[in-house]
Amino acid sequence: MDGDPAVENELDAFSLILPLPYRVALIVVLAVWAWGANLQFLSALKIDVPALVHYPGRHTPTEPTHHLSTYRLATILTIPLTVSILLFWAVCRGDKESAVQWEILPNLYLLALVVIFFLPLQFFSRSGRYRTLTILKRVSIGGLAQPQDGKFGDVLMADVLTSYSKVLGDLFVALCMFFTPGRSSTGRPDRHCGGTYVVPFIIAIPSLIRLRQCLIEYFRVRKANAKAGSIGSHGWGGQHLANALKYSSAFPVIILSALQRDFDLAKSYISETGLFRLW
């Protein structure tokens, strides 16, 4: 059987209910619901978040509000996810071997999730999805828009990515296992899939993005001060260096976690207990 190895080293009960690909999908869909709730709550407080992140405006009163449009997209994402999970449960019936064999179901949903985000349909919050993808494309290489062009949205997106760094790592693990012969993405997660340090590197990428953004802001302040010949209203940029230090503090934790996972006393210059304390 594909992905057998003692039924993927014995699946735990939670993985039988929600395999890794479904957990990734569920957290992504919950993020869309949470964004809609944020928009609704802040709108009630008279805080115009769409203007802050340069979200496409509403030109007529008949157009749905931003939060309603987001809820609509979240619903469209939730319905096939619910159907897929129920179908997975019905087919597998808690059987470990069946759960490993039917990995195609959650991965088809992950594919559908990506397709829905790119569909050019207005009903699916097209303008919002386009704006999200535009920001994601820019920040993915550590870019940062000018304040008048939506810098706040770029910072917000990068901060969300840092919160979802573990999810990004899990997504890679799920896809790696799916495309690796003899493995199953619905089996026990193999954090070494693709190499020992690939997953830690992916987890570190969001912090690298925010670190670069902080440095960009610092040099912008320095450049503006040099041009003005004095320290401006934004100070000398120390707050951006402090922010950069905060995000760089994630790297030692990620590196030490990877070293603990692959600890080998024969190759290490420190004991496992010492490594744990350092972590």
Image (cartoon, rainbow, N blue to C red):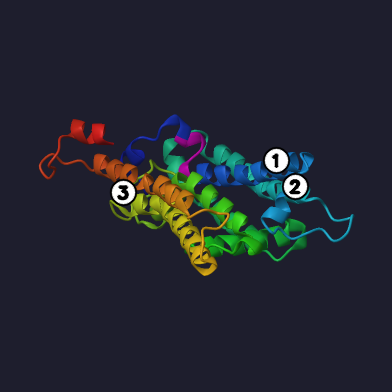
Location of mark 1 (residue): 37
Q: Closer to the N terminus: mark 3 or mark 2?
A: 2
Contact, CB < 8 Å: mark 2 with mark 1? yes
Which amino acid type is shown beneath numbered disc 1? Ala
Which amino acid type is shown beneath numbered disc 2? His
Location of mark 3 (residue): 192
Q: Which residues are magenta?
A: 15-20
Q: Is residue 31 magenta?
A: no
Which secondary structure, mark 2? helix
- Our reading of the magenta stretch's main secondary structure is helix
When the figure is inspected, residue 194 is found, relative to residue 165, above or below; the finding is below
Whole-Å distance between the Cαs marked 3 and 2?
40 Å
Contact, CB < 8 Å: mark 3 with mark 2? no
**Camera-side mark, 3 or 2:** 2
Mark 2 Cα shell of 10 Å, populated few (<14), some (14-19), many (≥20): many
Which residue is farthest right?
Answer: 61
Location of mark 2 (residue): 67
Q: Is residue 112 visible?
A: no
Q: Closer to the N terminus: mark 2 or mark 1?
A: 1
Whole-Å distance between the Cαs marked 2 and 1?
7 Å
**Camera-side mark, 1 or 3:** 1
